[in-house]
Each structure stands twice: as structure tokens, then as C-alpha cells.
Image (cartoon, coloured by chain):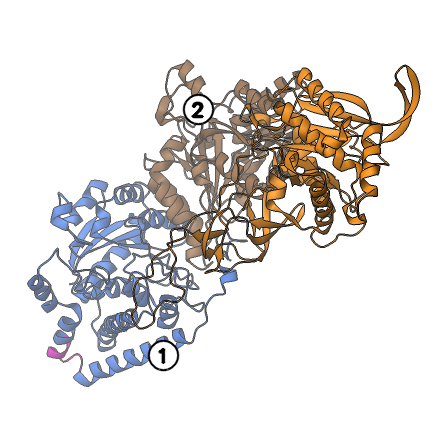
Amino acid sequence: MSGSAPVTYREACRQALRDALLSDSKTFLMGEDIGRYGGCYAVTKGLIDEFGEERVRDTPLSESAYVGAGIGAALVGMRPIVEIMTVNFSLLALDQIVNNAATIPHMSGGQFAVPLVIRIATGGGRRVAAQHSHSLEGWYAHIPGLRILAPAVLEDARYMLAAALADPNPVLIFEHVMLYNIEGALDPAVTGVDIDHAKVRRQGSDVSLIAYGNGLIKALAAAETLAGDGISAEVIDLRVLRPLDTVTILASVAKTRRCVIVDEGWKSGSLSAEIGMRIAEEGFFDLDAPLRRVCGREVPMPYAAHLEDAALPQPADIAAAARGLVRPA
Amino acid sequence: MSARVHLDHDHVRHLLRQMIRIRHFESKCVELYQAQKILGFLHLYDGEEAVSVGVMEALSPEDAVVATYREHGQAIARGIGMDVLMAEMLGKQEGCCRGRGGSMHIFDRESRFYGGNAIVGGGLPLAVGIALGDKMEGRPAVTTCFFGDGAVDEGEFHESMNLASLWKLPVLFVCENNLYAMGMALARAEAETDLARKAAAYRMPGVAVDGMDVVAVEGAARNAVEQVRAGGGPQFLECRTYRFRAHSMFDAQLYRAKDEVETWRKKGPIGRFQDWLMKNGLIREEEVHRIEADADAEIEKAVAFAESGTLEPVEELEKFVTMNQVPA
Amino acid sequence: MPALGADMEAGTLVEWLIKPGDKVKRGDVVAVVETQKGAIEVETFNEGIVSELVVPIGTKVPVGSLIARIGAPGEIAPERPVAAVPQPVPQPRPTPLPAAPPRPGRADVRITPAARRRASELGIDPATLSGTGVDGAVSIADVEAAARRPAAPTAPAAPLRRIGFNAAEMRKAIATAMGRSKREIPHYYLSQTIDLGAALAWLTAFNDAQPVPNRLLPAVILLKATALALREVPQLNGTYVDGEFRPGPGIHIGWAISLRGGGLVAPAILDADMRPLTELMAMMRDLVQRARAGGLRSSELGSATVTITSLGDRGAETVFGIIYPPQVALIGFGGIAVRPWVVDGRVEPRPLVTVSLAGDHRASDGHVGGLLLNAIERLLQEPEKL
């Protein structure tokens, strides 16, 4: 496979899954319509033909049972990769994820590990309204025992999975549905990524934009706009929502002294609130302006396009928030 | 009653001994609970001993067990030492889960005991996955999943029964039907109270057995396990039993009549089995006394072990929240 | 905790001079408070029995905090409860010390955490800065811009800190007040050169007839003349509070005293216009001595209605003063020097002083200021009437 050929995010995810199936016989995929149908977002398309029904398992619509089965299989040494079509459906498996996957290692006094990967599509923007569009990954980031990833760039889509599989703990990977079609070239020199650190995607000196997932794309667009105004925005891609890489966040804020947190999730009780609080706790004296957040509006996601656009953070909102900090009226 | 249960002297003595060990262990637990040495919830198995003792007889060491939060009996019958069990109940570092699990969350890697589970129904999907993993790896193991009648109310029961049957997984589903989900009577919770019939909806063989009869349970379990091990897919075994004591410790039992409890007590698994053995000359009274005395001595040793145990240093609080590696 | 000056935010209680059960009356010194300006005695404005000392010694509390309770007379609790007949001790109604007078125009400094830290590193009082950041907050940029501006000439800091004084703290306090003044008060300036020949001649004659301790300094003549002039031009005696000028309740002259360790205080000489020169002179001496020893009283620090600064013999020619908020005027006297002066069409050497006025344009205009300077000049020509 040529490293420099353009790939989509979707293809990068698929390559990662294929690599995983090729490299470890204990790895298998499980989820709704991932086999014959090819995956709700076509990520797993073709894999059933190559690896067969045993390792690319179509499940009934039983999120709790098949996620729990993934946990059980992981308990006995398998490396299951479970797909949940959308984060809204993951709530049907919340018991298994929170009460079993996240607790058993500790509850058993370290006798058992749960080396499970769960891939979950998340986020809004596809005009599919309030039961398929939310960004609930912040909830999962609340849970000790889980690692929460949010690949926003091709490289992460391609290589986070391998790192997640190497982790002896349950890892949830949230793939934003608006990212599947982004396209670009993978750097052939990069053959892996860490799943510990946030990453500075754009250097800047005036304000830090902290984002993840599709929010990162919007933050980068905002940074471009701001650059046109002579404002230098640094853009942090969180990548790992739990455990939070507070060091990278604080270092950026210490440099720029201003910070806008972008979160497509709702503001109340959100991941953005957590990040803001970490900055307040540990970076307070670096702040030269109030913290600002650009979050999803507090409504169930509406269907109508103009309403959905209004409900989601947009680059202009991010740029305006940043401008308000750097150049107050 | 299955003819394949060999009721020789050693075996019947073993069955009785196991039930007595469980009963006396829990009796000691009550004492320690009232002395505030065991804290939290304490769900006693009193009356249901025949179920796990009978079922465990059908299992091999390579098999896996997923238990409930009323799992002291399941744990003892599976062979987990009373010492580490009692130490766990006392919250000690020497406990099987280093004091992190307590009464409701007993885990034991050596005996493939994948936990008590305090979420009703929460263990069923796990059992499906354990069986799936074993099957994919070609291990001839059977996963036995205990749950109560309350779990049958849950969606996870139906999802898991379906998935196990659909994928022909080696699971023995054991429903300990003690007629009450905490205070909720079965007849008030289920439209179909003949739980064994539900298995049919998943094309799964389902059998109901007298859960107060240890020999009957063992026989039914042996039958079921044999079929599961032969690759025939999962089996459902409903053990009809009764809980003599409160749901947990603090329970006024407003939901059932005293004479109902008394009626069931007369059918109690230990007394009934013991009487039957003596009547048939399979055991002598002195033997019973010796079994009881041995059990009590074992329990005293376990208590002493637990009492002399150490407390996990608080610095270790966060240990195992995430694992550094998958235990070999 | 009384406000002892516009720039005081907090004080540390260093000594209680009363205890529960003591009878106090208005004007009694009840406590000693360590402030940015040194140890200051706090008086009470109430009469009654001390019922509770709320703030323990060593505690720093913000201005306006309750520090003690004084029960009203007639509500006196028995000194000791009668042991034999236990009965509820009537709870003295707490009479809090008078609330600190509102500090006009003074909001808490809105400053970002990073700017506050930077200001501290640069030794800049944030209160002296104006903010251009979000919501008008002082930002790092504001602090650093201030740091780039040339520092106002100040006396070198004392090499050692004396008890009761902290030169750095005082510098900060001055910076706070003066910064606020420059930020908020639109100053106008007037000056006038005055022939002191008559006044000094009268002074020499007066002093010759007095024992040394009673002798007068030229400063007291300037002070008295100014106080009397302010009677004529009351628009310059008072405070500017909440957007309006409030005439002073009397002519309370804040007399600027420079301290040897660096820094400045301006304790008030109350009703200066009504006191004879000898008394004023004694008060001035006392004030200077106590100011330098750190023994000023709270009432002396918060009550001035106008400030006079006199540079004395070795001073510069003209003062361009900064008003001490919330006052509306500062009158400055340069050094007295013999210079050529035209008298009756002829140039003569005369002892001259340049008096200047810094006026708050919100409260008065230059015309009024001119009236004051003219009045001072006129009064100084008839020293015997002072």
C-alpha cells in the first residue's frame, strides 16, 4: 500500500482494522451491520469477505449483549473490536461499559483486565436529528478505567487503533461522522501514534483553541480566519479525552494566556467544563483573559439544516470568541 | 433424578458437606455483620445452597463461572477458599479482590470465577462473551452463568439468551428462581412465570428442576453441561428455590408472609437431604456432627486469617483502575 | 476596619487597646492597625461598653470588616454573671464600628491572573493601571506598557525596613492612589508667584519675641493663608464622590509629609482655618514627628478635604501636584528663594514662592482656581491677620 496515495478517514479506519485482523488472531470485529452490509458508515466494507463471519461478526440489535460479550471475550484473552453505530445507541450498552468494563479490573483486585476496543460514531452535522447526532463522549470521559480517544486527523484514524489494542484496558474510540470523508495523504514515515498526548496542530501565540474531533477541523478553520486578522491562534487537538493531557493544555495556555475551548457537546457538565476547570486549577496565574467556550447549543439536535448549523459550534463562532479575548472591543 | 449422579457414600457426604459449609459460613457472616466487621450489603444464600452445590458438581476446572451478588454459595461451591473469601468480606488486602470487591463482587482467576455482579442481569452478556472467547480459541470450556428470576425481567437476559443461542455458544444459563426479585414477587413481575419456557423463544433447551433437591440439581446440571460441551449450544436450567432470609440484611420482609417462609423452610435443602441420607443409611448422625464441626473449624480459621489480615494501604487506592498489562 | 485612606484595602490588627467590658467613648484609641502606611491607631466613634473583640491580633481584614462590637450605653451586660442565680445574660446589641466611608470611584481592580502576577514581578500596583483587556480588565499588555513608561521620580527606597513601615508597601499605596488620580481626575494646573517679603518680615519679628519652641516656620503661614483662602473659595475644599462635588465639613488640610525612608503621608489638620498659628505650628510638629515614627491616628488619615504640599527651602521652584482622591484640589508651594521681582516699577530682590494649584476639572474650573491663588496671595500680604 503506498503511503502517499490519498486516503479518506474512512479508509484509514478500515486499514487500521485490517491491520489488526491480520496481525493478531485474537482480534475480531463485532457489531451491527459491520459484515454483510459493510458497516453503517462503510468503515468495515469488504472485511467480511477477507476475514470471514467468525472474525467480522454481525450482531443482532443487542448493544448490551454484544458489548458485554466483547467484555467477556476480552476477559478471557481475546482482543475484540466492537462497533456501535452511533453514540446514542451506546447508551443501550452503558451498563456493560460503565458497570463491567470500567470496574472489573479494579473490583477484581487486578485479577482481570479488559483489553477491549469499542469504536463509536459520534457527532452532529448529518441532518439526522436528535437520536443520531449527539456528542456524548464527554460522558464516557467521566469514567475511571476507560481510555477515550477522538481521532480527528487521518494519521490518528489510521494508527490509534493499534495503540488502543495494545492497551490492556477498555478503550473507546469516537469517530466523528463528519470526518469519514476527509481525504489526504498519510505520511509514510509515520507508522504509529501514541494515545497519551494531545497535539498542537497549529502553532500560535495569541490564543489557544482547544478542540477535538470535528471541532478540531472547525478550530483550524477559525485559526486561519484569525490569522487573516493578524491574530495568531494555537490549535490543540485533544486526541485523548481521558486521561486528559493536562500538560499540553497548560503549556499552550501558559504561552498564549488565552483559551477558547471548543466542544460540540452541550456546555453544561461537559468535557469543556472539565478542561476549563483544569486550567482554572492549574493554570490560573497564566490566564490573561477569561476562559471561553464554544459549545453545542443546549437543545436536542434539530433536523432542519439551518437549525442544526445553529446548534453546532461553527468556525465563525470560534473565531469571534477568540477575537473577543485577543482584541476586546 | 438423573441416574448418572452416583450416590455413593463419598459423594453424598461431599454434597452435604458443601451445603453445610456454605450455610455455616454465612451464619458466621451474619455474626460478623452485626459486629460491623462486614459492612455494606450482605445477601445470604440460606435456602438456596443446593443450587450452586449441585451445579458446580457438573463443572470441570477449565469451565468458567459468572455469578450474582448473592454468590458466597457459588464461590464456596466453586472451591474458592473460605480464608480469602472471608478476608475479602472484611475488606482486607488478603481478600481475593484485595478488599476492592467485597461481598457482592467476588472474583477468582484461578477457578475462572468471573465475578459476582451487583447489576441484575449484568453478568449475562459477560458469560456470552467468555463463552465466545473460549469457543473461538477452541477451549472445551462451558461458561455457567448464574442469575436470579429478577434478571429475567431485564433486557440483557433476552439479548444474551438470543446471542448465545444464535452463535451456539457454550453457556449454561442457571436461573436461581427464588420467587422474589428483592421484594418483587415473580407473579407480579413476569407475564409468564414458567421461566424455563422462555428458553424456547431462543430455540434453547430449557429445563426446570427442584432447586431444593441437590441431587436433582446435580443431575439436571450434568445433563445440560454434557450437551453444551458436546457443542449443542447453550442450555437453560431453572432451579426453583427459596430464600429463607431477608434479601439483604436490612429487610422487614413486608412482601411475603411468615408462614410462606416456614412452609419453604420445611423443604430446606440441607435438612431434607440429611434426613433422606440418614433414612436410607447413607450417612450416620456422628458423621453429620463431624462435618459440621469441621466446617466450623474451617470457618474459624478463615475468620482468624481475615481478622489478622492487613488493610490495603490507601496509597494503593487507584491501583488496578487501569492495568499495566493483561495478567498472564 | 476603618478605611484610613482611599488607597487602603485592608489592615492587620496588631494591638488591641481595649478589652471586653471596657467603657469607651468617641475618640478613644481602641486598636493599632498595621497598614501599607505603617501602624495607625484606630479610634472609635461610638460610646458604650466593648462587648466583643471580633478580630484576633495578627489578622488581616479588609476595610469595612467588623473588628469589634461595642454595646450601646444602657445595654451593659453585668461584668460577671451572678453565679448563684444563673439567668440569661442579656445580649448586648452589637453596634458595629461605623462603616468605612464609601470609597468613591473605587471598584476592585479587575485584572487577569496573569497580569496580576506580572505586575507583582515588575513591582507595579495593578490599581494604578487602566485596563484594555476583556471587560476592561487589566491585562499583561497593560502591565507591560506601564512598565515601559518612565517611572515617576521618587525618593530612593529606604535601605532597611523600619518597624511600622514598609517602604515597598507604601510605594505601592502611593502608586495606587496617584495612579487612580491620574486615571480618573482631569487635572488642571494654575500657578502664581507670590512675594513673601511682608510675610517673612512679620515672621522674623514674631519669632524674635518667642521662646524657641514656639517659633513659627514659613510653612505654617502658607498653610494658614491657604486655609483662609479656601473659606473664600469653598469649591476647592471637599471631595468628588459619586459624580458630584461634596463640600468639606470643615477646612481639613492634609499636610504632605515626606518620610525619611521614602514615601509620603498627608495627615489632616482639622479646621485649620480656625486655629491660631502657634497651635497650627505645634500640630504640624507633632504630626511630622508621629508620621515619621509611625504613630498617626485613623482620624488624621481619612479626613482631609484638601492637601497642601510645601517643598520647603530646598525644594524645586514649582509643584505640579497630583490630587489625592477623592479630594478635588492640591495646593503646592515651591521652595522660597530670593529672586528679582518688580516692585513699584523697579526690579528688586525679593523672597518669592510659587504657589500652584492642581484642580479637579470635574469639580471646578480654572477661574475658581485663580480666585483661590489670588486670595492666598492677598492673605500673605497681611500676615498679621493670619
The chain whose colour is orange is C
Write down the colour of chain A: brown
Work out how far the residue at label 2 is from the one at label 1, CA to CA, in angstroms. Answer: 61 Å
Residue range highlighted in magenta? B277-284
Residue B280 part of the magenta segment: yes
Which residue does the numbered mark 1 point to in the structure image? B301
User: Disc number at residue A124?
Assistant: 2
Question: Which image quarter is the C terminus of chain C in?
Answer: top right
Q: Position of residue A94 (x, y in %)?
A: 36, 41
| Residue type marked 1 | Lys
Residue toward you, C158 or A322:
C158
Mark linked to residue B249: none
Q: Chain of mark 1?
A: B
Q: Decide: is A141 above or below C69.
A: above
- What is the drawing colour of chain B? blue
Circle 2: is it few (<14), some (14-19), or many (20+) Cα within 10 Å? many
Number of residues whose C-alpha sits closer than 10 Å to that of mark 1, classed few (under 14), some (14–19) or many (20 or more): some
Apparent side of residue B156 relative to residue C2 in the rendered image (left or right): left
In the figure, is residue C99 to the left or right of A65?
A: right
Residue drawn at the location 78% of the way across and 49% of the way down: C213
Compare residues B294 and A286 and report the one nearer the observer: A286
Tell me the element at label 1.
helix
Secondary element at tag 2: loop
Which residue does the image show at 45% across and 17% down from the upper left? A309
Question: Vertical placement of A36 versus C4: above or below?
Answer: above
